[in-house]
Image: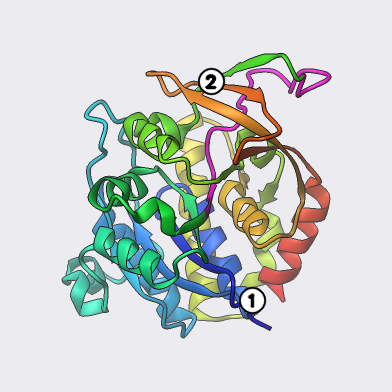
Amino acid sequence: MENNNRFFLLDTDIGSDIDDAMALLLYLRLENVPLIGITTMYSIAALRAKIAKKMLLLANEDIPVAIGRDKTIDKRGYMWKTGLEGFGVLTEEEFRIDPGDMGIIDNGIDFIIDKAKQYTGKLEIISIGQFTNIAAAIQEDPHFKDHIKRIWSMSAGITFLDPIPEGFPEPNETYHAIPSHNIRSDVEAAKVVLDADIPITFIGNDVTTQVVLFNEDIEPLRDYYSGLNKAIIDMMDIWLTYRSRRLDREINFTCLHDALTVAEALGKDFTQKTPINIAIEESGATIVSYDPNSSHNIAWQVDANSFMNWYLEHILG
């Protein structure tokens, strides 16, 4: 039964790394998840919106999709794309047509603000991309932050070069971590969101890189033909081929960064979390310290096997 106190909005840079699509696929396989909209951002936001919308159409789901910001708030923002976004899921015609012809909303920031007001105190944003759209909403509406119940972010937290230190988190210790992609891509946006003091749970690389999907794991999708299954398999093939060429060796796996974030937002608790204070340096690196009174927390351990079994059971079911 739907929990009327929780509603979700997915904010995504879907289309480059396959993990956003695998996270959306999880939503589409679950029942009674109150997803009230999807917004896209980061460089080719309109194309990313088409990818999300097409996946919804293939699943016969009518969920609003809105185009967010193309440009980062930080003028130094790190911009990355593969150049293969949309291949495997969009037709030649869909690449060309206006997003509005696919039923896509053209102002994602207004959309987020309106949904925050509509679901005030109940809306949780699952941020599996940069903080650009959320920061823009905060800047445009001074009351936006008061409407949001929590943000679930695939970013920051602790991203150590080495394994998490023994005894973490020590009460009086400060931990410095390397920049994560979603923070580094728009550092100023991340600072705006942190300054707004919205409760945030960070699901970072230290846990997400432990949940690994091998190509062979989703091969059974080929045996249960549907338009959505074919699109997922085709996008996975394109992503792994791209990665293999970039790294000059065969890559047959990918990390389910965003799918784990979705699972944690839905209360599956595959990770252990701890409350922290967090600051962001100009480079995008994070500085964290334990604080039991903080509204921010990070995931720092994960039961990877349990998550992967649960994930595969649902996407293959």
Q: Which percent across, then down, holds residue 153?
A: 53, 46
Q: Residue under circle 2?
A: 178
Residue 84 position (above or below residue 3):
above
Which sits in the foreground, 64 or 7? 7
In the rendered view, does 283 fall on the left or right side of 153? left
Graded by Cα atoms within 10 Å as few (under 14), some (14 to 19) or many (20 or more), the crowding at tag 2 reads some
- Looking at the rendered structure, the kind of residue marked 1 is Asn
Among numbered discs 1 and 2, the one appearing first in the sequence = 1
Q: Which percent across, then down, holds residue 298?
A: 65, 37
Observer able to see residue 203: yes
Graded by Cα atoms within 10 Å as few (under 14), some (14 to 19) or many (20 or more), the crowding at tag 1 reads few
Residue 35 painted magenta: no
Report the magenta residues as a range.
Answer: 150-170
| Label 2 residue SS | loop
Secondary structure, magenta segment, majority class: loop
In the rendered view, does 133 fall on the left or right side of 238? left
Q: Residue under circle 1?
A: 3
Q: Which percent across, then down, holds residue 212?
A: 69, 46
Which sits in the foreground, 153 or 90? 153
Q: Which percent across, then down, holds residue 154?
A: 54, 44
Residue 267 position (above or below residue 220):
above
Residue 285 position (above or below residue 267):
above
Which sits in the foreground, 172 or 39? 172
Residue at point 59%, 28% (across, down):
277
Q: Name the mark on residue 254.
A: none
Q: CA distance from mark 1 to mark 2?
A: 37 Å
- In the picture, residue 72 is in which quadrant? top left
Residue 156 painted magenta: yes
| Label 1 residue SS | loop
Quadrant of the image containing the C terminus: bottom right
Residue at point 29%, 66% (across, down):
111
